[in-house]
Image: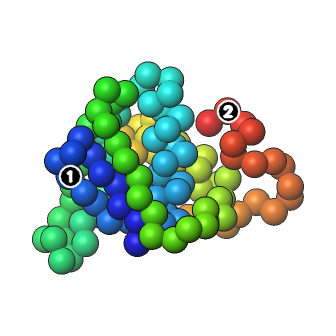
Amino acid sequence: MGKLFYDSTLTVDFDDRVLAHLQIVIGAKLRRGESFYFSWKDDPAVGDGRSTIWLAPNIPLHYKYFGSRLPALNREWIIALSASSNSAGGLQIVPEPPANTSGTGSPEGGQL
């Protein structure tokens, strides 16, 4: 279980695999100087509601992974998360689509 630390005031737990995909999408948007909302469904242990934060290039983020290995990345999921981040509602964790196994390249090599 990884952790996302936001502005030294909030810590949120995410599965390492989810966190790795979020890091790529969030990093791409912040690198371009874009600000946006990020929403997720809270764990029942903290109230079972929804939370939303405003992400901007000047707000400190820290990603902490439980595992020592980078999870396998699914380019299709990165594309779906990126599309979500460009919507009026901002980035939301969408279901992971099946991975494209046609060998079309890694997510790091393309424009997202």
- The x and y percentages for residue 20 are 52, 57
Residue at x-position 52% and y-position 71%: 67
Name the one closer to the observer, 90 or 43.
43
Give the percent coordinates (x, y) of residue 72. 66, 64
Which class describes the residues within 10 Å of circle 1: few (<14), some (14-19), or many (20+)?
few
Label number found at residue 77: none
Circle count: 2
Q: Position of residue 42 (x, y in %)?
A: 24, 66
Q: Is residue 32 left or right of residue 13?
A: right
The residue lying at 30 percent from left, 51 percent from top is 5
**In the displayed structure, does residue 42 sit left or right of residue 98?**
left
Nearer to the camera, 96 or 55: 55
Under mark 2, the amino acid is Gln
Which residue type carries mark 1? Answer: Leu
Quadrant into which the N terminus falls: bottom left
Q: Residue furthest right?
A: 103
- Judged left or right of residue 49, residue 84 is right
Q: Is residue 110 visible?
A: yes
Pinpoint residue 30: horizontal percent, then vertical percent: 44, 30
Q: Is residue 18 above or below residue 53?
A: below
Compute the Cα span from label 1 to label 2.
30 Å
Of badges 1 and 2, the one in the foreground is 1
Q: Residue furthest top?
A: 33
Which residue appears at 65% of the width and 59% of the height? 73
Return the residue found at the far left: 47
Residue on which the image places disc 1: 10
Mark 2 Cα-neighbour bin, 10 Å: few <14, some 14–19, many ≥20: few
Tell me if label 1 and label 2 are in contact, CB under 8 Å. Answer: no
- Classify mark 1: helix, strand or loop: strand
Residue underneath mark 2: 111
Horizontal side of 51 relative to 92 (left or right) equals: left
Residue farthest to the front, as pictured = 68
